Amino acid sequence: MSKSLPEFKYMSFDIVGTLIDFEGGLTSCLNGIAAEAGVTIDGEEALSLYRAARYAEDADLFPDDLVRVYLAIAPKLGLPVDKAYGERLRDSAKKWKAFPDSAEAMARLARDYRLIAMTNARRWAFEHFSAELGNPFHAAFTADDTGAEKPDPAFFHQVFNFVSGEGASKDDILHVAQSQYHDIGVSRNLGMTNCWIERRHAQKGYGGTIEPAEFTKPDYHFTSMAGLAEAATAARS
């Protein structure tokens, strides 16, 4: 039986894809480039190509890697192959929007929990994401801080060490994320309680996120952050 929501002291969050609509941000920028070039692209095809390119062996940290990714996928989408457009895609991360329910949900949850950001993005990008969300975090761990990327357990262990310094343990954390591959599977393997935010519940496939080798049934499951916030409030009433 999973712990009840009021029993947790912390909630840790994946950021890109869970709270920030990175798929919308990517496709919006690519559509803008396509319009200027006089072509039309299919958003889901673009995300599929992105996914394949993003997880190449020579990948850089995110979102800096979007320059390389753009140059890899542009010919397949009929877009101009020019580094300047790749830089435009990378820099678009500064303007990516939160999902409509993210900021309000995080503000509600911050009243009762210490919120921890866990993102594979670099610190410069996270600062923009955090501002978009209303800066709700008690602590934040980025790829720059950890020297690792999820699903590497080393990333999670740095968070465990942090909460240990505050007199808590991983058992006091509910890990919240949309990515089965980056978060839900590894958090289960590490003995954490987790919550899957199924952002693509109305869409087929995994979009821009790599498909996991196997599906992990989460301890908690919602299709929105609003659902989690409402459940947390109800559990305390």
Image (cartoon, rainbow, N blue to C red):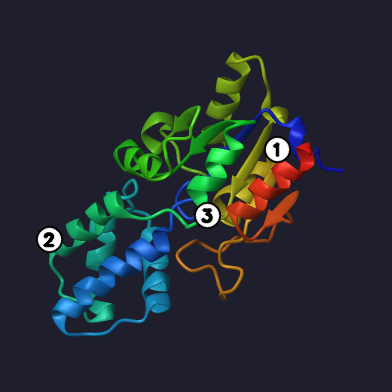
Circle number at residue 101: 3
Residue drawn at 45 percent across, 42 percent down: 119
User: Which residue extends farthest front?
Assistant: 237
* 3 or 2: mark nearer the eye: 3
Left or right of 38: which side holds 168? right
Q: Looking at the image, can residue 152 be seen?
A: no
10 Å neighbourhood of mark 2: few (<14), some, or many (≥20)?
Answer: few
Left or right of 70: which side holds 196? right
Residue 177 on image: x %, y %: 58, 49
Circle 1: residue type: Met
Left or right of 78: which side holds 160? right
The image quadrant where one finds the N terminus is top right
Circle 3: residue type: Asp
Circle number at residue 84: 2
10 Å neighbourhood of mark 3: few (<14), some, or many (≥20)?
Answer: some
Q: Quadrant of residue 186?
A: top right
**How much space separates mark 3 and mark 1, taking CA atoms?**
25 Å
10 Å neighbourhood of mark 1: few (<14), some, or many (≥20)?
Answer: some
Compared to residue 5, the image places residue 198 above or below, namely below
Residue 159 on image: x %, y %: 55, 28
Q: Quadrant of residue 22?
A: bottom left
